[in-house]
Image: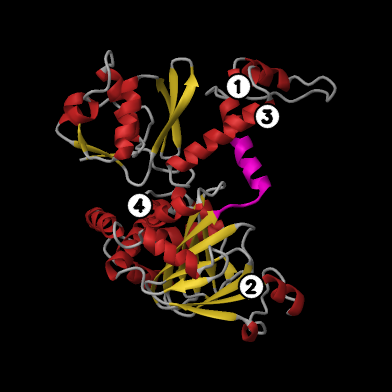
Amino acid sequence: MDTLSVKSNYMKRSLNYRLDSEWWDYFLEKTADLRRPAICKNVLSGDERNWFEQALLELVSTRTRDDSQKLRLYIEGNLMNTGYLYDNFFPNLPDGRESILQWLQRTFGDVKFALLINNCELMNDTIPTAVVRYLSPLLEKTGLPCNGLQIDAIIGNYGYTPFGIHRDNIGDAIFHFHLGPAPKHMYTWETGYYLNTLHGRQNEQDIESFIPFANKFEITEGDVYYMPWTEYHVGYTPEISMSVTVTIQSGIKTNLVSNMLKQLSADLLVSADQGHLASEKTPSSPRAFSRLDKELDRNPLWNEYSFYDALKLTYDKFLLKLGSNCGMHAGVSARGDQNPIERTGDWFKDRSISVNDPFPIFWREHSEGLMEIYARGHDFVLAKETLVETMIRRLNDGGPYSYSSLLENTGEGNSEKRALELLNRLYALKAIVVE
């Protein structure tokens, strides 16, 4: 949408001076280094709220049908099944001629509803990119969460949170960017008090009896509310409001190990043909493992490293991929195929080239003569050349550059072909901006 692209430029400019390092110092002091809940008033401007509302409208209209598993819809407190979504919700997606509030009124009328969209970072690049521009100065101070960031959207007039008083996953820190228009009330209880004194429980539905003993926060449009995982809480939204939430997932060891083993599996079984495994006739004479054995035998990671060292290399790779996408797992950032039609030097030469701020580009040694490059949560391998190293360093240092200035003084014997290969890969992954 043209409106979105115009407002994206506004967002990038405004965020250069709004949520800067000094503001996050204030935020860390207010939240006791992210250990207690707090609310910061009037953080988002009207233009920023309008931008997010338009971005949410685009997300709902273009991505929810394809990513229906990330959608939860509650009507009058009841979770709707997939059949309801396809029969009643998807036929009434935004038509491009209405605002998000007009669409909500047309779709739900006076019905109480809650529309929860999880993992926006895997669905759409617009909202996640804006959100991490807010958070990047904070992450520079606190470090990268080893289980990544999750970005969700919450829309509705559902009254109390449909799943009751609850506590989030261990280690999760949640930022709530409230778009309005209606306010939201958040009630919280310290864990020991809630469990031991009030005798509450997870997903408590008898909410009203606990409200007199709660801490109360009123979140109005433009506010940012923060809550650590240690608080039991429930929201109350009597009229339509919208919010974008970001969860910093420090998580627990089992989550990290699960992520590492998933990455290790992908690195070990690199063949595009995963193949069908035949059924085992008897448990005492397994045949399927021999097929795995042949695949693993061709992989240096399996043959040349101990399991510990392979897991450590995998963890390093996992963090580099995560860091290159500012803490988000790789989603839909790539422009289609990672091996796009090659753009020539003539295509690049009259354009400016810069890194897609705030997403850095990383690289490390892969094997003799090769380097592994990490961009927007993805990785690829190129021949190791001084030219490639210099170009990555320059892109990370700033810009924009012209094509010729990006390549100048990059060492003798370097080929323009390698430079174009790098630029085409980075452009396909939206790791660079070419204008």
Q: Residue at x 64, y 21 (%)?
A: 305
Drawn side of residue 237 relative to residue 253, left or right: left
Depth check, front residue: 75 or 238: 238
Q: CA distance from mark 1 to mark 4?
A: 36 Å
Q: Mark 3 or mark 2: which is in front?
A: 3
Amino acid found under the numbered disc labelled 3: Tyr
Span shown in magenta: 249-263
- For image coordinates 20% across by 25% down, the residue present is 345
Q: Earlier in the sequence, mark 3 or mark 1?
A: 1
Callout 3 touching callout 1 (CB < 8 Å): no
Nearest to viewer (mark 1 / mark 4): 1
Marked residue nearer the N-terminal end (3 or 2): 2
Mark 1 sits on what residue?
301
Give the Cα separation between the discs numbered 3 and 2. Answer: 41 Å
Q: Are marks 1 and 2 in contact (CB under 8 Å)?
A: no
Q: Amino acid at mark 1?
A: Leu
Q: Which residue is mark 4?
A: 126
**Image quadrant where residue 213 sits:** bottom right
Tell me if residue 256 comes above or below residue 211 in the rendering: above
In the image, residue 13 lies at what x, y percent?
25, 56
Label 2 sits on residue: 165
* Residue 66 visible in the shown view: no
Q: Name the residue furthest left.
A: 350
How far is the residue under mark 3 from the one under mark 1? 11 Å
Q: Which residue is mark 3?
A: 308
Q: Residue furthest right?
A: 284
